[in-house]
Amino acid sequence: MHNACIGRGTIGINSLYLINKNLLMKVLVIGAGNMGLAYAKALVKSEFLSNHNLMISDTSAEKTEELKKISRFDVFTNLSDCLPKADIIFIAVKPYHTDELFEELKPMMSPDQIVISIMAGVTIQSMKDGLGITKVVRAMPNLPAQVGKGLTSFTASDEVSRLELSTVENLLDTTGRSVRLDTENDVDASTGISGSGPAYVFYFMHSMMEAAKKMGFSVHDSKVLVGTTFEGAVELFNKSDLSPEGWMKRVASKGGTTRAALDSMEDNNIKQLIEDAAYAAFNRAVELGKES
Ligand SMILES: NC(=O)C1=CN([C@@H]2O[C@H](COP(=O)(O)OP(=O)(O)OC[C@H]3O[C@@H](n4cnc5c(N)ncnc54)[C@H](O)[C@@H]3O)[C@@H](O)[C@H]2O)C=CC1
Ligand SMILES: O=C(O)[C@@H]1CCC=N1
């Protein structure tokens, strides 16, 4: 059983103290890729950081030059120019870049700094050892963070105080919702559901678009048919307490077209195959942790 505490991305009265405090702190995002940039953009848009309290760093000169032209935050190529100024550091590079990154960071880290890693599988202990610090948050976001509809699960080392955790939660909630979990194993499990999950949805969408094209629809029309169907179904699901099975029953008439499709899925064991896929991602996250 996974215990979770879900943040809704709203600001309560008790958060006012945190907002004022947050305005004074500096955040550094390392890695300006899909996820790092999603966080950086959400953070500058939020009321939690004032201008120029958000720094971003990437080893790709091409990326940093591009970012300098468009961004409202401070862009760096050298970590030595920004790391010492940061209170909170998001690490958003690929897990296989950790060794070289940690080697560079370790001599510059200070014990007060809080690291939030969004890297799949990289354990809290390996970050404590690799960076020589104790305040570590291990988070697993997902790609809809780019449009403010992300889900970030997270857990933290014991050395992160309750107040610091609230600050972290507020920062994570700028990209959508967050779920605080008890253990790193829970974070690995959530990787198999929400972290990697958007790709499973895209897989399903792709398959439906391929079927639509085979039936003679143009690419444009296939996209509209599939995209609108997903959007509508998700809205129905989110706006009621009805289970997915309940909704399936509302679509399927006895002896009708939907029943034919659902029977075909059952005969082909699609449910089991999706469960296997989610477990494959979960197990891979655990495996990455052993490698880290
Ligand atoms: N893409 C996704 O849907 C999700 C990704 N993640 C995690 O987020 C992390 C980043 O993934 P993406 O954003 O998709 O990767 P990405 O490849 O788009 O971005 C990584 C960025 O890090 C930069 N980088 C590499 N080494 C660096 C260093 N030493 N210093 C500064 N920058 C450096 C690269 O130039 C690149 O711009 C991964 O660890 C992944 O496990 C987590 C949840 C979802
Ligand atoms: O595929 C990956 O490893 C990352 C983690 C979750 C989504 N993307």
Image (cartoon, rainbow, N blue to C red):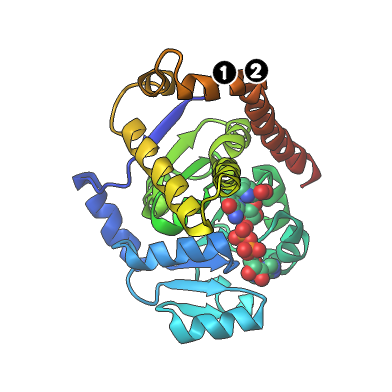
Crowd tier of the residue under label 2, counting other residues whose Cα lies within 10 Å: few below 14, some 14–19, many 20 or above: few
Instruction: Determine the secondary structure under disc 1.
Output: helix
Q: Position of residue 97 (x, y in %)?
A: 74, 61
Q: Residue at x 72, y 47 (%)?
A: 126
Of the pair 205 and 137, the residue shown nearer to us: 205
Q: Is 127 left, or right, of 4 in this rendering?
A: right
Q: Residue at x 47, y 24 (%)?
A: 257
Of the pair 279 and 28, the residue shown nearer to us: 279
Q: Position of residue 226 (x, y in %)?
A: 47, 46
* Disc 2/disc 1 C-alpha distance (Å): 6 Å
Labelled disc at residue 263: 1
Residue lying farthest to the right in this orientation: 291
Q: Amino acid at mark 1?
A: Asp
Residue lying farthest to the top in this orientation: 254
* 80 w.r.t. 111: above or below: below
Instruction: Determine the secondary structure under disc 2.
Output: helix
* Quadrant, the N terminus: top right
